[in-house]
Amino acid sequence: MNANETLENTKKLLKKHNQSHLLTFWGQLGTAERRNLLAQIRQLDLAKIDGWVANFVKKSFSTEINADLVPAQSYSYAPDEPGQKRKYDKAVKLGKELILAGKVAALVVAGGQGTRLGFDGPKGDFPISPVKKKTLFQIFAENIKAVSERYQTSCPWYIMTSPLNYTETKKIFRVNNYYGLKKSDVFIFQQGTLPNFSFDGKILLADKANIASSPDGHGGCLKALCESGAVDDMKKRGIELLSYWQVDNPLVNIFDPLFIGLHVLDQAEMSSKALIKARPKEKVGNFCLADSKVAVIEYSDFPDKLAKRQNPDGSLLFQLGSIAIHIISVRFIKRLNAEGISLPLHRAVKKIPFIDEQGRFINPDEPNGIKLETFIFDALPLASKSIILQTLRSEEFAPTKNKTGVDSVKTTRQMMIARAADWLESAGVVIPRKADGSADCTIEIAPSFALTKEDIKAKLNQIPQIKPKDEIYLA
Ligand code: UD1
């Protein structure tokens, strides 16, 4: 088929699916631009897009809330009776054996930019730690390094970026010499993208030769792990489990033997950590059971009346909040890919810069279009079995999402200091405190010094006396 026939066919197809405007500027494009635009158009499944336009773009489709949603059950943070204590001990032992055997790898989703943070760069490169201003990437790398040294095993790290920050993220790791990790143990890959739409269902053009698109949501990692060769790499290494978290949370306990062990003991395919929500409308996903399957309903989709419903003791009925920490079995990822992954789409009304039909570049002040995403937690109901383990906010959840206010740089640093102070105090170290009970000093504990609270006791002789306003770094 010659170029002309290809173009004619493409024109016919676009006309059939009401997207002919994508070739408005064809006459003004050079050969390479034409080839590039045709390649982008060929990537589009226009028939599928018709469905998206009807169901997600033109219609403010909100996640259908299952009428008989009930609260999900979870394992408590600490065992609450002897039988459970025995199971937790067995799980911890199994979890440690699996880490030691090199069957567990780390997976961080880092496709988001630091926009909300006002940080111009991959969020992972944001300097967050209270004393040394280590970046999020550095903190995770040091955690992984400390685990692999402790277990004398390699703990590969898979890092999902988006096309927007892939090159920059690769450069950051190169320049920082992979933060002391083996280069071969760091696998950086890209997630896919989805086209952006105007409210009337037209695919937007970013410029005369390029379709406007954006990262396909962290649900896109399931496909990207396969398409990027990461799953093949795991196969070669004998990796069976992935410890998943978001780049915005520096307190994550990446290799948690209890969580790993419970996931495997219960033969789960995808499991989650949860915390008790601080308030009904806290901006976290809500765990529930839908048709007896564990599911997460995002805070933006969760009906107020359900969010506010209480138990007789006044606690929230739907009290389990998702902190985007999961264990995912590699066989589950393979199964979903083999079956053809179709996670539900979520729409977001956004300001999307575009080229209008007169060829003018428009940078809107108001939301003018729709971005579509898939969410990783929508894979939970597809798992044959899924468990939830509660954790403590103070121990494991201090996301950096906003410049100021809740989940901000300031709150994250305060929580990092608070956890460090709590760890030291639990080992008998005296911590100077302010009248409000917060630590009256700045403390940072490197993963090389302690990965968990229990590690402090053995290092008491390395901890200086701490005076008010002191800045302490333990490594
Ligand atoms: C997210 C969860 C929410 C959870 C909360 C915990 C979603 C939709 N909601 O909310 O249920 O309770 O975190 O902190 O995720 N990302 C990518 N690629 C993408 C989109 C996002 O890698 O295409 C990564 C980002 O780097 C970011 C993370 O996913 O770290 C979260 O994304 P975001 O959309 O900001 O969700 P939240 O509102 O933070």
Image (spheres, helix red, strand yellow):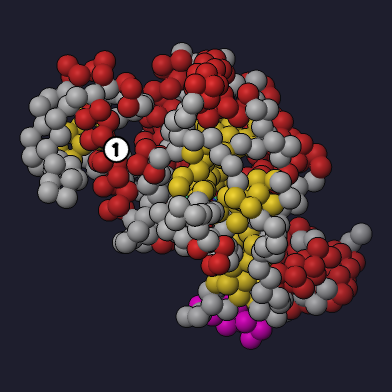
Side of 72 where 418 appears, left or right:
left
Disc 1 element: helix
* Rendered residue at 10%/27% (across/down): 465
Above-or-below relation of 157 to 112: above
The image position of residue 243, as x and y in percent, is: 54, 33
Quadrant position of residue 294: top right
Query: Closer to the camera, 261 or 66?
Result: 66
- The residue depicted at 36 percent of the width and 26 percent of the height is 451
Q: Which residues are magenta?
A: 354-363
Q: Is residue 69 magenta?
A: no
- Residue at x-position 92% and y-position 59%: 1
The residue that disc 1 covers is 419
- Residue 159: x and y, percent? 53, 39
State whether residue 89 appears in this view. Answer: yes
Dominant secondary structure, magenta? loop
Residue 41: percent from the left, percent from the top?
76, 64
| Identity, as a three-letter code, of the amino acid under mark 1 | Arg
Residue 308 locus on image (x, y percent) = 50, 63
Left/right placement of residue 455 relative to residue 212 reads left
- Residue at the outermost left position: 467
Pick the front one: 293 or 61: 293
- The residue lying furthest to the front in this view is 312
Judge whether residue 360 is colored magenta: yes
Residue 228: in sight, yes or no?
Answer: no
As displayed, is residue 114 above or below residue 108? below
Q: Is residue 428 above or below residue 386?
A: above
Residue 222 location, quadrant: top right
Question: How many C-alpha atoms fall within 10 Å of the one at disc 1: few (<14), some, or many (≥20)?
Answer: many
